[in-house]
Structure formats: C-alpha cells, structure tokens
Image (cartoon, rainbow, N blue to C red):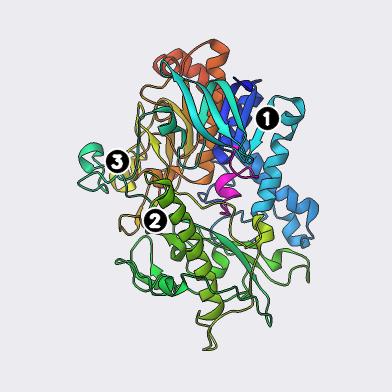
Amino acid sequence: MTDRMTDVLVVGGGLGGVAAALAALRRGRSVVMTEETDWLGGQLTTQGTPPDEHPWIEQFGCTRSYRRLRDEIRRYYRDWYPLTPQARDRPDLNPGEGRVSRLCHEPRVAAAVLSAMVAPYLAAGTLRILYGHVAVSADVEHDRVRALTLVGPGGERVVIEARYVLDATELGDLLPLTGTEHVTGFESAARTGEPSAPAEEQPANMQAFSWVFAVDHRAGEDHTIDRPAGYARWREYRPSFWPDRLLSLTAPDPRTLETVPRRFVPNEASGPTFADQSRDPGDKDLWTFRRILSRGVFSPGFLDSDVVVVNWPMIDYLPGPLIGVPDEERRRHLAGARELSLSMLYWLQTEAPRPDGGTGWPGLRPRGDVMGTTDGLAKAPYIRESRRITARYTVVEQDLAYSVRGERGAVDYPDSVGIGMYRIDLHPSTGGDTYIDVASCPFQIPLGALLPVRMRNLLPAAKNLGTTHITNGCYRLHPVEWNIGEAAGALASFCLDRHLEPEQVHKDELLLAQFQHGLVADGVELAWPQVRGY
C-alpha cells in the first residue's frame, strides 16, 4: 500500500536535501522530505558545525538561495539579539567572530531559519516533512526506484511512491538500499590516476567522523561532568602518526604536518579574527577557532561568556567507520565517538594546562541549549565522507589540484551545474592515514557527477555525488553541498516538466543549455571569475 505519492522524494534533511526540496518546490513540484532528527540542516545544525567557506563568499561563489540562507541568519540576529551598534551596521555581521568562517553562529538559529524558508510550502501543502524517519527498504523496477518504505519514531511504517528520489542522506544510505552502484573509501591510483591516491583500493578506509559539542566558560563555577567510563583509555590513546596523546593541545598542522601546539584560553580578549583560508586554517587558537557567540558583538553584559563549538582534530574518531560495518559495530563506533568527545571535555575541565601553571578549566559548561540537546553534544555526528555513486563522470584530483592545474585553473566542465572552492581537506582516516591537505583551484560541479551509471530516477543530493575519496575533500563543504542538492532538485523538476530522463539532458547539447539557462536564472553560478586557487 502506498501512503503518499509525490513528484520528488528527498531523503535526508541536511543542506543538500533542503536545497533540493526548495529547488523543486520553486518549480511547482510536490515534495516529501524525510529527516532522521527533528532539525533540518545537517552539518550546519544537527552536526553543530559553522559553515566552512572560501574567502570570496561575501561577493560571489555560491547560489542565490544559499546566500539568502546566510542573509537570513544575520537578519535573525539583527531582529532578535541586542547587538552593539557597530556589529548591527556591519553587512558581514559575524555573531561568533570565529576564525573558521565569516559567519559563525548557533546551530539552533540556522535550524530556525531553515524552518522558516520551507514554511510557506508547508502552508501551501506542496511540502510534507517526515521528521524522525529512516528509509529501510526500496521497491526498484527496471532501474527505477518506484517507492521507499520508511520507519518513523514510533516504529510506524510509511510507503512513499515518487517519480524522482533524491538521496540527501549523510552517508548515502539509499545507494545500497536501491542497489545503486557506488564506491566507498580510497580508490587506487591505478583506477583514478590521482597523485594522492594509494597503490591499492581501500574501501574501508574513510575520513574520521566527529561528535561536536558546545561550551561556554563560567569563571569561579564548577561544571565538571562525570568522568566518562572509558576516560582512562582515551587519555592514553595516541594514533601512530600523532605527535602526542589525542587528548592534548598538540596536533599536526594539516598542511605541513609539522607538530604545532594549540592555544586554549577561555574568553581571552580578541576582536574580529577571521582567518583567510588561503593563508591560514585558523585552528591555532582553539577558543576563537569555531566560536559561535562573541561577547564583543553584543551589548555589554548580555553574555557572561563567549560560546564555542569544539570541532577540533583531537575529537576525530579513528577506530572505525560507520559505513560497511555490521549494525552492532556501527553502534559501538557511535558510542565511542561520543565518549571521546566527552573525554575531551573532561580533560579540558580537569587536566588541560593553563597559562598560570595550573591545570583544568572547571568552569567550562556544556551548552546543550544551542545544540538542541541536554548534554552539549550535537544531535548527530559530523560526517565528512559518504558512499559515492559510480557516476557517468567522476571528479578526480588532477581535475582541480593546484599542483597539477596551476594557473590554468580547474578543468572547465561544459556541463557545469554550479561551482565551489575549498582546499582538498582530508582529515585523518580510519585506516591510519594522517592529513591529506592539497591546494586546489576554484572548481565547477559537472552534471555527469550527479548521474548514476544505471539508475534512471535516483539522484545524489549531498556528499554522495561522483567524486573520489580525494576530491570529496573539497566537495563536502557547506555551500558546495547546498549547490549539489539545488542542482539535483532542479534537474528532477526539469525532467518532469519535459518527460525526459537525466541522461537525455546530459547527452543533448540543446537540452543541457536550456537546463543551465534555467539554473542561471534561478541564481546558480556556473563559472568562476578570475580568482586564484590556494
């Protein structure tokens, strides 16, 4: 029995999923969107991570709808928070003055803004959102996904039949569920020709995931959490390639691999501190690195403390991946990542070195309220790597690495459906590899990377497009994921309007040009101006 029929089913309410749904809704399509948690936004909200963006983001280099998301987050603070006159007047208001981004903010604010962006379509009845739902089976016929069965929070089952199905899950969960050809982990150099690829394929070797948390600091108070059960083990844990114990303030520089001590002093005075990612990853001062609320932005006395997000190299979970393992092992890794993060918090509260020669910051207080949780941890783990479709075109390192392309810039794709820019930023992996951090050129998103080699109505709408383990490192960031989802939602609508299939659009120059023209009219940038990679 089918409980609901829709034009487009978007599974996963992360950034790519929301962008895909909005693109289809703007084009008059009916959409059902599902989300495992009770917030939309994925890495921006449920995973607690402020946007990782390129240095030109305030001028160009994202879609119009992504820019609206950024603008509305700033508007939320201007409308509801007591800002200083100077902060209120800044067009590039940064509530957290964090080094990692020009827009560091609370996850709950982004969740509120995303809810507002989809609200008109909920009111119109063209959008239905199923929170707390997970896809468990698929009905596939003749290389088409006819319907998906989902399970809700109470165990109830719902069957959704859709003309197009978009996989916007964080781990590419629909790919094995529907039998869609896909890859995981490291591809081999023999397969991809990539300079940074290993000699042999390593499908179980993936970027570490992290369980992010938020804290502030209340001087003179004691908010020390209970000692985690596995603290003794984590306290002594040291990966073979790491310069110190993981629970420390020492880590490699991602770009040079030199050992670099980090600084951590709560509420140390600082002004606007944005780090230009072309020169500096911004992670040497951990208090300001991912600060999401800065006292200096708000009226005097409004905040007793800054609020910071801890998404540091020291909480990258390395013992194993979440993909390709039995459910019991997956649950063990999830619990282990939570315990690692809580152990980091306990270490900071009790053992971290202070400038005065003492140890521990017991005034560090978990801020579950900004994460929508009770313990200060994010609602979900921060995912860096997904399953990836075996695509009609796979983006490889030599398409965009600055060491290969130089001043020529990235390969120019005639089937571009968007753009993005970030260094190839691969965190340490579950297979024991250290950072791979490679300079890249501003790049495009090719339509061919959104097309599975066989499936006819399933499209990737997040980090699961046709990249490699290497190039995933720059296609996984916030504005790129949004653009991928937006292009997927637009493509599904374009095909429905014209009774076409995605492969036909890709192969026909006239249809492709019409599709690209529609993207541009909707505010999608297909090419970069003359800017240099980093």
Provide residue 23's location: percent of width, then percent of height.
60, 28
* Inter-mark Cα distance, 1 to 3: 41 Å
- Residue 261, can we see it? no
User: Which residue is depicted at the point 40% across and 33% down?
Assistant: 176
* Residue at image mark 2: 427
Viewer-nearest residue: 83 or 477? 477
Q: Amino acid at mark 3?
A: Gln
In reply to whether residue 423 is colored magenta, the answer given is no
Mark 3 and 2 residues: CB-CB less than 8 Å, in contact?
A: no
Viewer-nearest residue: 495 or 385? 385
Q: Amino acid at mark 2?
A: His
The segment highlighted magenta reads 35-50
Disc 2 vs disc 1: which is toward the camera? 1
Q: Could you say which quadrant of the image residue 471 lies in?
A: top left
Instruction: State whether residue 271 is above or below residue 505.
Output: below
* Residue at image mark 3: 398
- Residue 533, can we see it? yes
Estimate how packed mark 2 is, as few (under 14), some (14 to 19) or many (20 or more) residues with alpha carbons within 10 Å. Answer: many
**Left or right: where 214 falls relative to 187:** right
Between discs 1 and 3, the one toward the N terminus: 1
* Residue at image mark 1: 128
Instruction: State whether residue 134 is above or below residue 361.
Output: above
Provide residue 363's location: percent of width, then percent of height.
64, 77
In reply to whether residue 48 is colored magenta, the answer given is yes
Disc 1 vs disc 3: which is toward the camera? 1
Instruction: State whether residue 142 is above or below residue 325.
Output: above
Q: Amino acid at mark 1?
A: Arg
User: Which residue is depicted at the point 74% across and 61% down?
Assistant: 86
Outermost bottom residue: 357
Between discs 2 and 1, the one toward the N terminus: 1
